[in-house]
Image: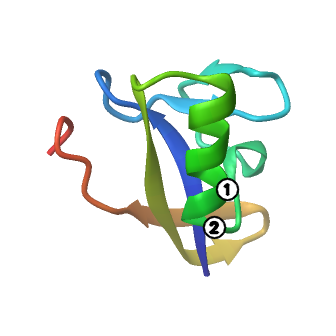
Amino acid sequence: MNFWAIGFLYQEDVWYDLEKKEDSLDLRSTCFLPTQEMAQQIIDDELSIQYVPVKIEIESMNKGVWSWSRGTVSHWD
């Protein structure tokens, strides 16, 4: 399954939690959006250019614990 999350451009693996409206060090389901366009719209409307959409692939899920990988982010990789 693929989702999109909003990442903080200048610190690896810092995510924007849509429910709490703040940055989070944990990637949670409240960080997921269905499309890149939705992520970009939130960045444009509510955040700043310091955030980027990041593609998240859920590779497996077992008893509420998931393994995932993310797309490339130029400042992180």
- Whether residue 26 is visible, yes or no, is no
Residue 37, image x, y percentages: 59, 61
Q: Relative to 54, is 61 above or below? A: below
| Residue 71 in the image: above or below residue 27 | below
The residue drawn where x is 45% and y is 63% is 55
Expressed as whole percent of the image width and height from the top left, the position of residue 45 reads: 67, 31
Q: Position of residue 48 (x, y in %)?
A: 50, 22
Q: Which residue is mark 1?
A: 38
Nearer to me, 56 or 38: 38
Residue at horizontal 58 percent and vertical 78 percent from the top = 60
Q: CA distance from mark 2 to mark 1?
A: 5 Å
Q: Is residue 32 left or right of residue 54?
A: right
Lateral position of residue 39 relative to residue 7, left or right: right
Q: Is residue 13 visible?
A: yes
Q: Amino acid at mark 2?
A: Thr
Inspect the image, locate mark 1, and give the three-letter code of the amino acid beneath it: Met
Q: Are marks 2 and 1 in contact (CB under 8 Å)?
A: yes
Q: Residues within 10 Å of mark 1 (few under 14, many from 20)?
A: some
Q: Under tag 1, what secondary structure?
A: helix
| Quadrant housing the N terminus | bottom right
The answer to which quarter of the image holds residue 51 is top left
Position of residue 7 relative to residue 5, above or below, is: above
| The C terminus sits in image quarter | top left
Count of marks overlaid on the render: 2
* Residue 61, image x, y percentages: 67, 74
In the rendered image, which residue does mark 2 sit on? Answer: 35
Mark 2 Cα shell of 10 Å, populated few (<14), some (14-19), many (≥20): some
